[in-house]
Amino acid sequence: MTTTAQIGVTGLAVMGRNLARNFARNGYTVALHNRTAARTRELVDRFGDEGDFVPTETAKEFVAALERPRRLVVMVKAGDPTDAVIKEFAPLLEPGDMIIDGGNAHFADTRRREKQLREQGIHFVGAGISGGEEGALNGPSIMPGGSEESYASLGPMLARISAKAKDGAPCVTHIGPDGAGHFVKMTHNGIEYADMQLIGEAYQLLRDVAGYSAAQIADVFRTWNTGRLDSYLIEITADVLSHVDEATGKPFVDVVLDQAEQKGTGRWTVQIALDLGVPVSGIAEAVFARSVSTQGFHEMAAGSAEYDWHLDLGKVAAIWRGGCIIRAAFLDRITRAYEAQPQLPSLLADKTFAEEIAAAQDDWRDVIATAAKQGVPTPAFAATLAYYDSLRAERLPAALTQGQRDYFGAHAYRRTDRDGVFHTLWGGDKTEVDS
Ligand code: NBP
């Protein structure tokens, strides 16, 4: 084995594969590795003629294929897999080598890993990478943290493979030490969540209030994209909305299940914002909209299931009736509702609560409309009304969000009319494939 590769990529799923190809297309020799060797072989079989690849099967071979100081990009699923990969590779590395984690790690994990590897003399670079699969291939925005020394070595390479802004500047800069890159990427994703939610709300208003078809709304977004709103998300929204499902002849957005998923970064943004005391209410609403199930009792029901606590929510309501700050006569009725139906998914699913709130909703809307017209902020009134409307809605724009996620990140979606997980080849002929 010759030690010639300037960079190596381990983790060759959607992102890693495209990033490796991007390095190779830009003239770098790229060592390849993946836990399951079949992925490595597939990359070389399909794209081997795009550049200079060095496929390897074992960690030892991979490390041996890299010139020193070694630059080793990790593009595996964030969380435990990243720790597993570090555990496997770190003993094979030497002082001065660099591990670049391009996954969506939590910045606190990155700080921990950076500190641990620094003791071994290894530079750990937590690098946020944005742009989805297309960006990874043709030029992502890159947010590297870590030491100045590692950036001196990596910066020129990252600049070469990164996206270029309209003025030609590479979309990469040294963000700061240890977890700074991943913190900024996390916040970027939080903003992305909020953008997508705002687009979803605009779509829903045009559909349900203005009575436009999906195709007409696509045209509206196309027009918006020529003006001040010119942006990637507005552009792909027009594409997603104008796409017609081949199997049913219906708008694609109508056959996608309206449950948008998330992989954690939006949620972390809100969690950290609470710690930092920063009001990121728009991002929080977007995160909640992806899991319209997270208020008070809902959150406890979710926590109970997650941690296997078997919480008795009726009893919780009962012990809050006196003494505590939120004591209220109302809690009697909550207790009764949970006694009658311990598995109640939401209080709004209880008949008497549902009827009472339905009767009050016109006044509720008037309050918020008046406040909005008068410029009086009523975030809690407005947010809870949105929550209520989300639970009542027959369809939510989460289907559009899933379409956007599949478009830029190959995150796949479920359909309303059949089981399975699907992905549309957006960049190609838009056929649907099993995912
Ligand atoms: P995934 O997040 O789906 O991860 C799949 C990869 O992780 C495969 O190579 C898999 O190997 C490897 N892996 C797993 Br799972 N467990 C492992 C373990 N214990 N040891 C070693 N390898 C393991 O891939 P992706 O969607 O390409 O994303 C890669 C990273 O980039 C993630 O952190 C993601 O959050 C981040 N990211 C994704 C996007 C996007 O739009 N998709 C955008 C920006 C950043 P295998 O082949 O052997 O199963």
Image (cartoon, helix red, strand yellow):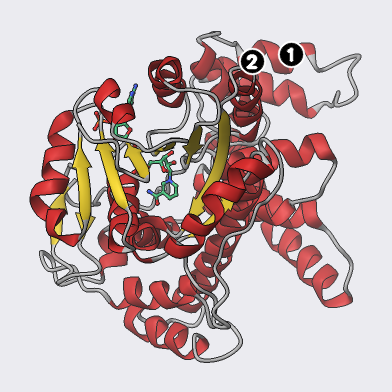
**Tag 2: amino acid:** Gly
Question: For this rendering, which residue is in front, 115 or 350?
Answer: 115
Residue 407 image position (x, y, % from top left): 33, 62
Quadrant of the image where one finds ligand 1:
top left
* Identity of the residue drawn at 57% across and 20% down: 303
- Residue 422 shows up from this direction: no
Give the secondary structure at mark 1.
Answer: helix
Would you identify the image quadrant in which residue 277 lies? top right
* Identity of the residue drawn at 67% across and 19% down: 335
Q: Which residue is mark 2?
A: 314
Q: Residues within 10 Å of mark 1 (few under 14, many from 20)?
A: some
Would you identify the image quadrant in which residue 38 lies? top left
Question: For this rendering, which residue is in front, 371 or 198?
Answer: 198
Q: Quadrant of the N terminus?
A: top left
- Say if disc 1 is inside 8 Å of ligand 1: no
The answer to whether the residues at label 2 and label 1 have Cβ atoms under 8 Å apart is yes
**Tag 1: amino acid:** Ala
- Say if disc 2 is inside 8 Å of ligand 1: no
Mark seen at residue 318: 1
